[in-house]
Image: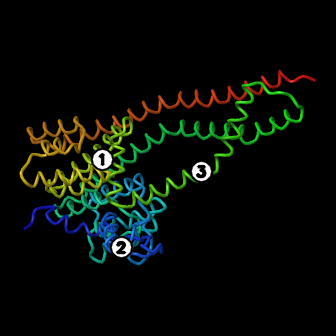
């Protein structure tokens, strides 16, 4: 009998049935269609072998229906309810049927099909993977291992905890970024109004009066004129840069280079590394507790990083572990985890408590992500306030100086 999780890698084909694509041919034609692939990177590589450059790849069902990504908070709620119902002794099909009236709105349309698939003999993991909502690979991997090991309720609880942690971290980061985002938008709108409306009208009025302008006022008006003239070319340059970025990052090697660049940035890099480490640690812990061997667990947990560069490093870690190297040593050599997480894993290897210390590392890195994000935002807020305040003050001062210099 194969150990739990031994066939996990072979069953990973069910996690994405395929991708709807838009791709550019060498002669400039734009081709669209659907193709079977196990991952976004595999789909891009298949297109490249056909001489096509992937422009857009979207997870989609084989029948052409697009699969929207499941919201992590809603997915956590569904998994938690399933875990409680199965833990109370209900069969999977009855538990799913009981949830149809309790689940979030987007899940109510998906659950009847999942329930029917389970009644027809499919596993819960397979039925969820075939649902109209795209489920993260690590979640279905944990459920597969739980089904093989006879602990599906516990596996659902582990998967729910992963989604809850992910949703909580994203909510905390969004909350921290809300104020500076509103401040940046409102400040930009105020400056734009001054440059596009107020200053041109003021310049026209002064011109009609035939008054000579003070140097400060003339400078502000000249800057406003240059800004208005450069607005459209600047917007086109930004749009072109975005298109180039989208094309480059649609390719596996381009996306990996972009993620590697983000990891090297002074402030963004440590936050991104800590966040990815937290996600991988909690996923790896859940997989190991569900009975998945370390090598396939690393393969599935690597998808939780949501970072092409770190996923590649974890793939190298998996190869090192398969060749007999200790997990902590491989992580240190590949720099896949933060130092704190690696040291905790090393301690867990000595004490035989790797899964529990992985969870502890995930909590530490998740808290660090939120703390560093808030610290960075705390520095950005006064900079934005001072910047926009200085611009408005300079413009207002120049206008007042011109008004006071007017002679009847």
First in sequence: mark 1 or mark 3?
A: 3
First in sequence: mark 2 or mark 3?
A: 2
Local packing at callout 1 (Cα closer than 10 Å; few below 14, some 14-19, many 20+) is: many
Badge 2 vs badge 3, beta-carbon distance below 8 Å? no
Local packing at callout 2 (Cα closer than 10 Å; few below 14, some 14-19, many 20+) is: few
Q: Is residue 256 left or right of residue 328?
A: right
Residue 117 seen in the figure: no
Local packing at callout 3 (Cα closer than 10 Å; few below 14, some 14-19, many 20+) is: few
Residue 145 is situated, as x and y percent measured from the top left of the image, at: 20, 60
Question: Nearer the viewer's eye, disc 2 or disc 1?
Answer: 2
Q: CA distance from mark 2 to mark 1?
A: 35 Å
Kindly identify the residue that appears in the image at 26 percent across and 53 percent down. 311
Q: Is residue 368 left or right of residue 181?
A: left
Judged from the image, the secondary structure of the residue bearing numbered disc 3 is helix
Q: CA distance from mark 1 to mark 3?
A: 36 Å
Q: How is the image coloured?
A: rainbow
**Disc 1: which residue:** 279
Judged from the image, the secondary structure of the residue bearing numbered disc 1 is helix
Residue 247 seen in the figure: yes
Judged from the image, the secondary structure of the residue bearing numbered disc 2 is loop
**Disc 2: which residue:** 51
The mark found on residue 235 in the picture is 3
Residue 71 is situated, as x and y percent measured from the top left of the image, at: 42, 56
Kindly identify the residue that appears in the image at 27 percent across and 41 percent down. 362
């Amino acid at each position: 009998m194969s150990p739990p999780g031994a066939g996990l890698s072979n069953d990973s084909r069910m996690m994405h049935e395929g991708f709807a694509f838009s791709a550019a041919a060498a002669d400039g034609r734009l081709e669209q269609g659907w193709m079977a692939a196990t991952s976004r990177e595999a789909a891009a590589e298949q297109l490249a072998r056909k001489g096509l450059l992937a422009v857009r790849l979207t997870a989609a069902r084989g029948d052409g229906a697009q699969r929207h990504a499941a919201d992590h908070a809603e997915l956590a709620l569904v998994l938690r309810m399933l875990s409680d119902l199965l833990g109370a002794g209900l069969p999977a099909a009855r538990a799913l049927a009981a949830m149809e009236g309790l689940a979030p709105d987007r899940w109510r349309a998906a659950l009847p099909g999942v329930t029917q698939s389970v009644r027809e003999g499919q596993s819960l993991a397979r039925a969820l993977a075939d649902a109209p909502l795209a489920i993260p690979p690590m979640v279905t991997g944990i459920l597969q291992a739980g089904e093989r090991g006879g602990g599906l309720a516990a596996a659902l609880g582990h998967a729910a905890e992963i989604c809850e942690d992910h949703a909580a971290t994203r909510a905390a980061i969004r909350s921290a970024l809300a104020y500076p985002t509103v401040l940046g938008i409102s400040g930009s709108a105020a400056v734009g109004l001054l440059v596009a409306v107020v200053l041109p009208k003021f310049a026209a009025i002064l011109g009609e009066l035939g008054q000579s302008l003070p140097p400060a006022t003339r400078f502000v008006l000249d800057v406003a004129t240059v800004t208005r003239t450069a607005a459209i070319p600047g917007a086109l340059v930004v749009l072109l840069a975005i298109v180039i970025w989208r094309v480059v990052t649609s390719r596996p090697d381009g996306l990996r280079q972009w993620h590697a660049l983000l990891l090297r940035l002074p402030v963004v890099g440590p936050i991104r590394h800590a966040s990815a480490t937290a996600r991988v640690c909690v996923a790896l812990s859940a997989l190991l507790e569900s009975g998945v061997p370390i090598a396939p667990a690393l393969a599935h947990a690597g998808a939780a990083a949501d970072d092409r560069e770190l996923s590649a490093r974890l793939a190298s870690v998996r190869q090192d572990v398969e060749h007999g190297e200790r997990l902590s040593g491989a992580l240190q050599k590949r720099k896949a985890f933060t130092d704190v997480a690696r040291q905790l894993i090393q301690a867990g290897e000595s004490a035989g408590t790797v899964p529990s210390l992985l969870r502890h590392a995930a909590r530490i890195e998740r808290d660090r992500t939120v703390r560093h994000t808030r610290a960075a935002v705390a520095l950005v807020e006064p900079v934005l306030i001072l910047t926009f305040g200085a611009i408005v003050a300079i413009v207002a001062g120049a206008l007042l100086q011109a008004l006071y210099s007017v002679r009847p």
